[in-house]
Image (cartoon, rainbow, N blue to C red):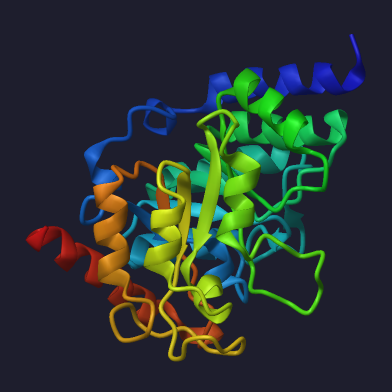
Amino acid sequence: MKRGRLFTLMLIGFAAVCASPAFAVKPFPNELYVGGFLLGPQAYTFNRFSLFEAIDNAKAAGCSVIEMYPGQRLSPDSDVSFDHNSPVSLIAKLKMKLESAGVRAVNYGVVRIPNNEEEARKIFDFAKVMGLLTITTEPEDGAMDLIEKLVKEYDIRIAIHNHPKTDDPNYKFWDPKYVLSLVKDRDPRIGSCSDLGHWARSGIKPVEALRMLEGRVISCHMKDLNEFGVRDAHDVVWGKGVCDVAACLDELRRQHFSGNISIEYEYNWDNSLPEVKQCVDFVREYGKTH
């Protein structure tokens, strides 16, 4: 048996021993939802802090789920960063922290999935061990066949993320039409991680992009911005900007969206928790009237 596969089996065995029933992938218990949505921060919102602190902030904001990203410092008392290559000992510490905080990791990214099976499997193995629902990616060119193969094998969703349009003609993920062209004939577990703010920065109305991707919206990085069509527009509390968050929630509900919504608040970095709480409250109030 190859060393990499042996390591994978060790990780899966470790997960089976250490994971509690609360961290099973399906079904999600009702207490994880806010306003009818699986809502929690993208840990990048708190990238000035450690992952452990981001987990605590998720709970303080009124959420019970979080999306992790690769490379965040693991804990306040350590300079060690965490990603899908981290050893079993760090994974064990993270699992214990999540369980003690009452927070579930449901997603991981944005991580680039390469067109290399051995390296791609490391990401999927990590996602399986952590009990994640979805991997968020902007994949390497030519990797979609490999990704679809692994999605079918691991039963883990893939969500293709969009950053804003750039001057580089080779960067195409900003365009929902391009993302749709990549996923439309693929396994239904492959779709979009719809970043509303980056669409708005690219001059695309978020609700229109969501409609275009109907049936392929796997997860969402939800933002509201102070300006439309401006690359350096900044985040504002949901409902106070140009993204029409309520209409986007309406559209997600109409599509029977079942993925997670990540609050990716990229402003007021050192003290964004009060604004994040207001975004959570916006969705909670939305749920009371819809």
Q: Nearer the viewer, residue 228 or 21?
A: 228
Residue situated furthest left in the rendering: 289
Q: Quadrant of residue 289?
A: bottom left
Question: Can residue 119 be seen in this snapshot?
Answer: yes
41 relative to 215, above or below: below
Q: Quadrant of residue 120?
A: top right
Residue 26 percent across, percent down from the top left:
38, 27
Residue plotted at (62% across, 46% down): 181
Location of the C terminus by quadrant is: bottom left
Residue plotted at (20% across, 63% down): 284
Residue plotted at (41% across, 41% down): 215
186 relative to 46, above or below: above
Residue plotted at (43% across, 46% down): 100
Going by the image, does 243 lie left or right of 271?
Answer: left
Going by the image, does 280 lie left or right of 219?
Answer: left
Residue 110 percent across, percent down from the top left:
66, 56
Going by the image, does 263 lie left or right of 284?
Answer: right
Going by the image, does 161 lie left or right of 56?
Answer: right
Number of labelled discs? 0
Location of the N terminus by quadrant is: top right
